[in-house]
Structure formats: structure tokens, C-alpha cells
Image (cartoon, grey):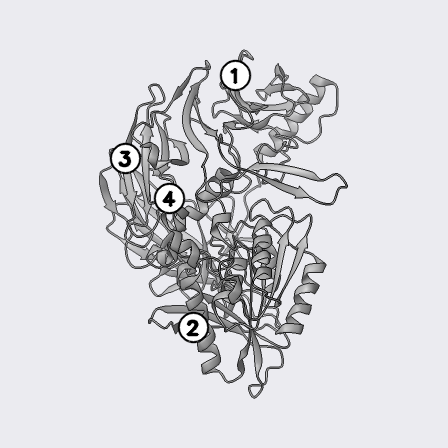
Amino acid sequence: MNKNLTLALSLAALLASPLVAQRRRRGPAGGARWAPDGQHVIAGNRWHDPVSWKVVEPAAAKAQPRDTTMRRFRQALERATGAKVGSLTRRATRSTLPRAPEAYVGWRMTADHSTSVAPVGDDLWAWDGKGEPRKIASGFTNVRHFELCPDGRAVSYIRDNNLFVTRIGDGQTKQLTKDGDTDTFNGELDWVYQEEVYGRGHFNAAWWSPSSEHLAYLRIDEKGVDTFTIVDFIPNRLALERIKYPKSGSTNPRATLHVADLDGQVRAIDLSKYKPDDEILIVRVGWTPNGSEVVFMVQNREQTWLDLDFANPETGAMRTVIHEGASDGWVSRLPMPRWLGDGSFVWESERTGYRHFYRYDTQGKLLATISKGKWAAGPVIRVDDEHGWIAFYGDEEGYAIGQHAYVASLDGKSLVQVTKGRGTHTVSFNTDGSMLLDRFSSLANPGEQWLRRRDGSNVRKVSARPAPRGAVETTWKQIKARDGETLDVTYVLPRNFDPDKKYPVWISTYSGPNSPSIRDSWRRVRQQQWYVQLQVNVRSASGRGMALTKKCYRQFGVQELRDIEDAIDWLCNDHKWADATRVGITGSSFGGFMTAFAMTHSKKFKCGIAGSGVYAWELYDTIYTERYMAKPQNNPSGYKASSCIAAAANLTGQLLILHGGKDDNVHMQNAMQFVYALERAGKQNFSLMIYPTARHGIRGAHTRALRQRFMRENL
């Protein structure tokens, strides 16, 4: 699920899973950039010395080797086959359904350009960049997840439902698995693992070792997992899609980890240390830099702990290196280790309530605490192992809506914030890491770019962007909730604002865990003529660290609604132009849930538009829901407290419910059960619009017009 910021952005938010929340941070576009030599700065199409800013002669541009190799490979294939080959670029099928055919798997090339491979028709061809290409093997029509190992010795792929390896040298094909069927996935993911663990649209579940000696892969067993049928009502003869979809509390798919070698020998990784009651999830898989060990992460079903495990690919024996646990929340799926030259690695953890960086050796010994404090460190920008530093993004204590860049020593002895000025910063370093270009903007600043040194000192201001003509001001405030917690709030006043008039208030929300609606970056705001636009980062969505994110644990909606109510009270009590009797709310996905929850658990809302919402958490999938809510069997009171369906009789205000008829993520069943509960409760203050062919994304002229008309009539 993604943030729902404005009416326009809500349409984009509908495309994202309610249950994968990511923090999107963007700096201003344009400006200077580092030249290809990594030493000079290109600004205004001229090369500059970064210190003196003198214009210098640009170095000759080099041809892009990948593009050149692909063109030559295509030409060689056309000579060999005597037919036009066309583009070798991979053409993916955008589908959230497992085992969807790939339009064209495309070519692959080793990093040193020594080997290129591509299926052409039914045949696999390989080329060393010098002579003519060789036909290696046949049987490559309709393969999926086609990958070349790092040194070019073999390719792996899925054919039908099984995993294969074909060696490039002699063309021998080894079938690694033979049990693939409707319920068994080998080397690829099922729906819930794809949606909630490895990322929407990412179904590959096989990973070559850096040495190319081994291929690790997941086997997923879906026997006993409930099948959900999605109906397309448009054809005269209904079209049915049947997907294994585990709803919270029901049977979960079981994953095991296996390793194969180039001779086709397969070994299972020993997971016997985990008890059957753990119902483990395997949430990341990778390798040590030399390929000597498989590196993977295991969590229990309710995700209250996470293990970082290493395993021997020859024997299957494994050991746990780091264990992360939580007693009053969940453990997030953490990034893979970032390896250093001495064999140690950088690890991210939220164990203090805030995400920070740590350095460990491969035996699990803590070597250094790289960052710390009551602020959250974020994505890594660069690791300079040779000079002993790491650069990463992060917040500031008390200021989480922006993004700064930090540089820390890998021994934990120094930490410097290298960016300055309120806003969302995006940086890029020169080749030796001594300087960085810093682009940033804020809600009040359309954008600047500075050249700085790695110690944070300024070299020069490169550019500044003036506010566009007619730019609309977004006001940001920090307010106090009823319990004293700080909340970030923004509002936008209507066009031709008159402080002596009363205006309705419209809130666009998402409010899912760790998914803020407010970011301190410049954006074009669509100013409305007749209402105030209000945003609030509820504490669990604020991005201020696990210490606050976990406030939604085991009861979705309860604390979030209190924070939304407190933002409304602040706006309407402190500003006479805000009309407390005309407050509306909208959201999609998790925001659709929050909209319906607010209108069934509060009397502050005159109307609302709920899109694609989960209206009872028993109806959503296991991995997302149980991370935050635990299993329904273990938390019945929390599920009841978080249910819109159970509270249908309490609906106040006018509610418009929108849903996609083919939504394979948040099923239309949610809307139907909610409407049924409203009907049985005798409620007349709701309406329903089903978009028959839409999935988890509703967009287009019809829904825009419907929303606008609803707001005019009810707000």
C-alpha cells in the first residue's frame, strides 16, 4: 500500500498493495551532475572543476559497452539463423498472478561481457563476442525466470513448473526438480510470498552464487492453502481465476531452501532447529561474497523474531549468526548484510526502537555500533570499505518528514550529517567520495543544489529553483495529540481564501504502518476552490522509528483514528475558518480501511470515500496481517476492535465504497461483506460502486467524476 496524498495521487496509490508500505522520497529534478570521469561537474552542459568552478574541456564520451554488445549479438544471431531476430530486450508481463507467462525473457550477459546468451524461438544461443554464436540447446519456448550465472557457465530457468539448469559449455540440461505442480513451486514464488515478502511482481526464487558453483532456490508447498476464486463477470461465460490465497489464521504455504550444483545434485538446507509451531517464513536469500555459504533470513509466522542464518551449500548444515526479537511488536524484514573486505558486514536493526547500522563478524560478534539515537537511519548510499566509511540517508530527531544524508566511520567513532537545510535531500558522490552534490527541496522551497565536501562543509551553491508562478503554499505544523505525542500536520487553503468564511475540511489518508502521507519535499498542489485539504502523519505511519510504528500493534485503526481526530480538533478549534461540521475523509487500500473505520468509530465525519479497503482483517492475507495483528486465534479482541464490518451499525455520515471486481489483493469480498453488514443493520447512508474489470487500482474519468460529484453533494 502506498500513501494517498491528494485526490490525484490517490489514483496512483490504488495501484499499490495495502500491505507493502514504502517511503517514497524525491528531491527536485534537474541541476548539475557528476561527469562520467567522476571528478568534474556538468552544469549547463559545461564541464566544471568542482573547486574553482572553471570551465574545462570535456573528456570524450565512451560508447556504452552493453548497448554495443547487444547490437553485435543480435547481428550475429541474424547471420546464424538467417532470420530477423529483433530486440533482445526483456519484455516483462506486468502481472501479480503467479506463473504468468513472460512475454520475452530477453538476453543475459556476464559482467565482463565475455558471454551473452538468449533464447531465440525454441533454441538457446550463446556468444563469446568474437566468433559466431553457438546453438546450445532446445526447449526454451515459454520458459520463466531465465538467468545466467555470474561466470557464464550455465543458465537457470523454469519450464512448466520445474527448475532446470543448462550448461553453456556442453549443452547438458539438468532437471533439478520433478515435483512441480499446482501446489508446488520450485524456484519461483506463490502469490503471498511475492506480494508481502519479495515484492509485488517479483516471482523469481532462485539465486546463483557469486562463484557460479551453486544455485539456491526456494520450494514452496501450498497444499492445504485455501483457493480464492476471482470472477470476471463481463464475458457471457464467466471467466474464473483461482489463486491460492491464505487468509489470516488459515493454512500458510511452507517454504524450504535447497541448493543445486552444476551437475544437478540437490541438497536441502537443514532447518530442523525450527519447531513446527514456528511455521517459518524464509524472507531473504543470498550468498557470501565468495559463494562459500548461503545467507538467508528466517522468521516465525507472526514475525516476532528474525534469524540471520548461514549454511554450507555442500552439506546443508546451517548456523544462526544474529537473532532479532521483539516482545511488544514485530521484527521487520531487514536488508541483507553489506559485506566488507575483511569478511565482516554492516547490519541494520530496529532493536532500539529506531533503525540503525551495526558491524558484525561472521560469527555474530558485534564489532561496532555505527549509528545511534532517537532517529531512524535509512537506505545506504555508499560503502567505502577502503577508507572505512559509510554514507546513508536518515531522519533527524524531532524531524522525520525530511531526509538528510549522513557519513559515519565503520568503526563507530564518528558520525556527520553532511546535508543542511530543511527538506528531502538526495546526494551523489564523486568517484573518490571526497565531494557530493546535494539536491533538496521542501514544502516551502522548490529546490536547491549544493556542492559539499564529505565532512559537510560547503563548497558552493550550484543552483536554486524559483517558485513557479501561482505556486500554492502548503502549511506544515507540528501539533500535540491528546496524550502529548507530536504529530506532523499540513493543510492547504482554498483558492481565493477568505478568513471570515467557513470552509469544509477534506482529509486524504493512508495511515498504514511506517507509510507517511506527509514528506517535506516540493510538490505541485492542486488548490481547490471550496475546501481545506488536511494531512496528518499518524504516529504509527510517521516513519519516526519502530518505537512509534508499533503503536498500531494488534489493533489496526484505533490509535490511528485518535491521531486523525486530534488533527481535526486542532485545525477546527484553532482556526475559525475550518468547519468542524463538514469534515470528509478518503483513502485507498489501507486508506480505504481507515476511511470506513473512521466513519464507523467516530462521529466527526460528514462523508467519506473508501477505495479497495480491508473491512475485516480476517479477510486479508496471512503474512501482512499477522505481522501486525498476530493470528486471529491469538488476538480475537484486536480483530474485533479493528473491524469495520463488526461496527457497521455505527456508520455515521455518508459513505461511498469503491472496489475493483477483479482485485486479487484486497478481494471484492471485503466490500460485499461490509455492504451486507450495513444492509442488515438497516443503514441507508452508503452507496457502492464496483468497477468490474479493475484489480487493486481504480482510475479513470468515471471514478474522478464520481468522487467530485459525491464530495459536492455530501461535503
**Quadrant location of the C terminus?**
bottom right
Q: Is residue 379 visible?
A: no
Q: Position of residue 24 (x, y in %)?
A: 49, 55
Q: Earlier in the sequence, mark 1 or mark 2?
A: 1
Query: Marks 2 and 3, how far apart in space?
Result: 44 Å
Q: Earlier in the sequence, mark 1 or mark 3?
A: 1
Q: Earlier in the sequence, mark 2 or mark 3?
A: 3
Numbered disc in front, either 4 or 2: 4
Amino acid marked by disc 2: Asp
In this view of the protein, which residue sits in the foreground, 158 or 583?
583
Residue beneath disc 4: 302
In this view of the protein, which residue sits in the foreground, 644 or 627?
644
Q: Quadrant of residue 129?
A: top right
Residue beneath disc 1: 175
Query: Marks 4 and 3, how far apart in space?
Result: 21 Å
**Mark linked to residue 566:** 2
Residue beneath disc 3: 321
Element marked by disc 2? helix
228 with respect to 268 (left or right): right
Q: Earlier in the sequence, mark 4 or mark 3?
A: 4
